[in-house]
Image (cartoon, coloured by chain):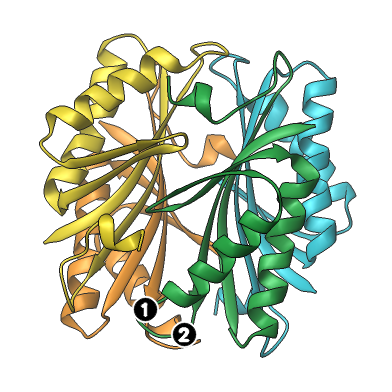
Chain colours: A green, B cyan, C yellow, D orange
């Protein structure tokens, strides 16, 4: 099933700047093959729902493996049965 | 990996009352075996991250199969490497 | 106090398409004088925290006055004491 | 206008434990006179929309004044024109 989503990663306990961890998450999202739109409050993605959910789990795994103690993600996930959802039509 | 999450389901296009769809989602979450805390803005869960992500995908699938045209979920997902996260300790 | 925020408006009970209500909200945000970045999951804004909170209340008031029965907004609000927050630096 | 909301405070840069700042925010919410339901992913409130928005601004002000460098809040705000919204009926 195709889906659109917004993924915002909030690392906790890394200090006032969270830039390095956010960039790492963005890299992982880009490597997933999903269509990607980055903005100031997260990354919007479009693609298969399984791929989206897998990359979210992978962000948590990789950030912990690389030293971040706590990771929170805020996600909005959208699907529809009448047509395939896509990021572009949500902007029109 | 163990995780805690908040799952809020927002069906779109079903009318002003979304109660039936929200209850259906709550049933699916309860059937998943996760530890569950329901509140007025969603359902908090505790358990394996894969189980959490699978139940989210299943909510979208089931609601569409049962007639809901659009489904959005708002999710907060939390993990930590220093100890197992749990819902109870977040309330203390 | 200066703040950055993401505002996503979800009208409930207007049907499968929520485009008219979302556009109306975007118009109200643009009229507020805030710096605005629209994306597929909401509108990011930058400006005075009071202006941001006022425009959120105004969106609810105007959409109800114009016929929308239920309105939900999902908001992320960020401030910082070490420097003025801005949308642009969150993208770097 | 009456509203219901969920307020989740995420202090950034205070370390792995955010408990002190979250408790301070909960105190401020309780002092506001709003109806309050605390849970593991935030505090649900019910009351006048202006009071809700004011307490959100106050949380940011007070936490900064008491030493937190960055504060993010995630808010869900709901209003309806057909009847007064309340937290209890959202649980039924």
Look at the numbered disc 1 and give the secondary structure of its residue: loop
Q: Residue at x 35, y 81 (%)?
A: A16
Give the percent coordinates (x, y) of residue C64: 31, 17
Up-down relation of residue B91 to residue C89 (above or below): below
Up-down relation of residue B18 to residue A54 (above or below): above
Q: Nearer the viewer, residue D53 or C14?
A: C14
Give the percent coordinates (x, y) of residue C13: 51, 15
Give the percent coordinates (x, y) of residue B15: 58, 14
Q: Which chain contains the residue that carries disc 1?
A: A
Look at the numbered disc 2 and give the secondary structure of its residue: loop
Give the percent coordinates (x, y) of residue B51: 85, 58
Q: Residue at x 36, y 60 (%)?
A: D73
Q: Nearer the viewer, residue D27 or B3?
A: B3
Residue B45 appears in the rendering: no
Circles 1 and 2, Cβ within 8 Å, touching? The answer is: yes
Q: Residue at x 60, y 27 (%)?
A: A86
* Residue A32 shown left or right of residue A50 in the figure: left
């Amino acid at each position: 099933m195709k889906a659109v989503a917004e993924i915002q990663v909030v690392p906790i306990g890394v200090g006032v700047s969270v830039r390095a961890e956010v960039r790492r998450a963005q890299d992982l999202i880009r490597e997933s093959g999903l269509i990607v739109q980055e903005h100031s409050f997260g990354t919007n993605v479009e693609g298969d729902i399984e791929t989206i959910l897998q990359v979210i789990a992978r962000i948590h795994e990789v950030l912990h493996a690389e030293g971040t103690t706590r990771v929170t993600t805020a996600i909005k996930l959208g699907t529809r049965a009448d047509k395939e959802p896509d990021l572009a039509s949500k902007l029109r």
